[in-house]
């Protein structure tokens, strides 16, 4: 991406996820696309165990911002939604297309960053991001873009790292039980030795940004790992023992206020 109006994090994250696709997301895709209960996050918290933040998606037009290999969109399609997957990484979309051929589950895929989506205003009932744009795109750009894409009364539901897990994250890997960095001043983060660039906001900044872009906040769900949680084979930065004490991830449920 050479557009000066777009952040350099897009190119950095395309490179990061091209590597990740070769290492594990392509291998994981078949299992992720299989019919299963809808879950959230690294420990697979069941949708119905947290009050079903998505609700009934049957018949809804859904845009997934930062869809990766599009497994989340595939799960929504199996529940009757009409998803469109948006992602800037060609390798991830190539995996998604391979899985479409294998499973027969098909929906549009568009190569684009969450910061700039080449689709018309007011095209969707629901926007979702499950560790996609919610973590890897610039919130100052992707939040207004999601508002633009939604119809009046449309909802945005997104999952990202909890802010407390960010504050406790250890640069060398893992999550501490003590604070590792100050609360004030975070936004853009590139971990030592990593190519990708993440974005982390404290709750007050999320609230201000969402309200500025016309959203009403309905829920903030701070996820607790299930009692039987096991360490994730790839995303091992947080252990179940930590996530039984503090929220490892959070889901924001917001709605355009012009319903």
Image (cartoon, rainbow, N blue to C red):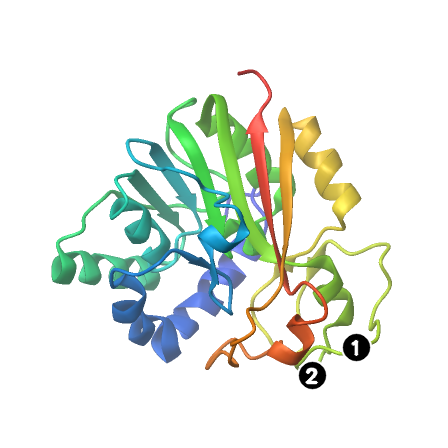
Residue 214 visible within the image: yes
Name the residue that disc number 1 marks.
177
Q: Residues within 10 Å of mark 2 (few under 14, many from 20)?
A: few
Compared to residue 103, the image places residue 193 above or below, namely below
Residue 233 in picture, x, y percent from top left: 46, 82
Q: Is residue 153 left or right of residue 90?
A: right
Q: Residue furthest top?
A: 258
Q: Is residue 114 above or below residue 71?
A: above
Q: Residue 113 location in percent, x, y? A: 45, 47
8 in relation to 25, above or below: above
Residue drawn at x 44%, y 66% is 17
Please name the residue that numbered disc 2 is placed on. 172
Of 69 and 120, the residue lying toward us: 69
Label 2, label 1: how far apart the Cα atoms are = 15 Å
Q: Residue at x 53, y 81 (%)?
A: 231
Q: Earlier in the sequence, mark 2 or mark 1?
A: 2
Q: Nearer the viewer, mark 2 or mark 1?
A: 1
Q: Which residue lies at the image location 63% right of the left edge and 24% below the top edge? A: 214
How many circles with numbers are drawn on the protein? 2
Residue 8 visible in rendering: no
Image coords of residue 163 (percent x, y): 72, 58
Q: Nearer the viewer, residue 140 or 49?
A: 49
- Residue 60 is drawn in which quadrant? top left
């Amino acid at each position: 991406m050479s557009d000066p109006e777009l952040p350099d994090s897009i190119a950095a994250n395309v490179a990061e996820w091209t590597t990740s696709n070769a290492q594990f997301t392509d291998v994981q895709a078949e299992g992720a696309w299989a019919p299963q209960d809808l879950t959230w996050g690294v420990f697979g918290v069941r949708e119905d165990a947290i009050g079903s933040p998505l609700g009934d998606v049957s018949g809804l037009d859904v845009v997934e911002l930062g869809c990766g290999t599009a497994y989340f969109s595939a799960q929504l399609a199996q529940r009757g939604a009409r998803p469109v997957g948006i992602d800037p990484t060609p390798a991830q979309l190539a995996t998604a297309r391979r899985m479409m051929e294998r499973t027969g589950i098909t929906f549009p895929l568009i190569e684009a960053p969450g910061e700039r989506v080449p689709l018309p205003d007011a095209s969707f009932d629901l926007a979702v991001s499950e560790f996609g744009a919610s973590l890897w795109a610039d919130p100052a750009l992707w939040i207004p873009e999601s508002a633009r894409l939604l119809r009046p009364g449309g909802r945005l539901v997104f999952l990202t790292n909890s802010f407390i897990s960010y504050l406790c994250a250890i640069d060398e890997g893992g999550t501490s039980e003590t604070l590792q960095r100050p609360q004030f001043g975070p936004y853009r983060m590139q971990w030592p030795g990593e190519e990708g660039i993440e974005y982390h906001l404290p709750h007050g900044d999320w609230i201000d940004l969402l309200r500025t872009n016309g959203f009403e906040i309905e829920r903030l769900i701070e996820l607790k790992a299930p009692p039987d949680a096991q360490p994730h084979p790839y995303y091992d930065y947080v252990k179940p023992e930590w996530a039984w004490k503090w929220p490892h991830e959070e889901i924001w449920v917001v709605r355009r206020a012009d319903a």
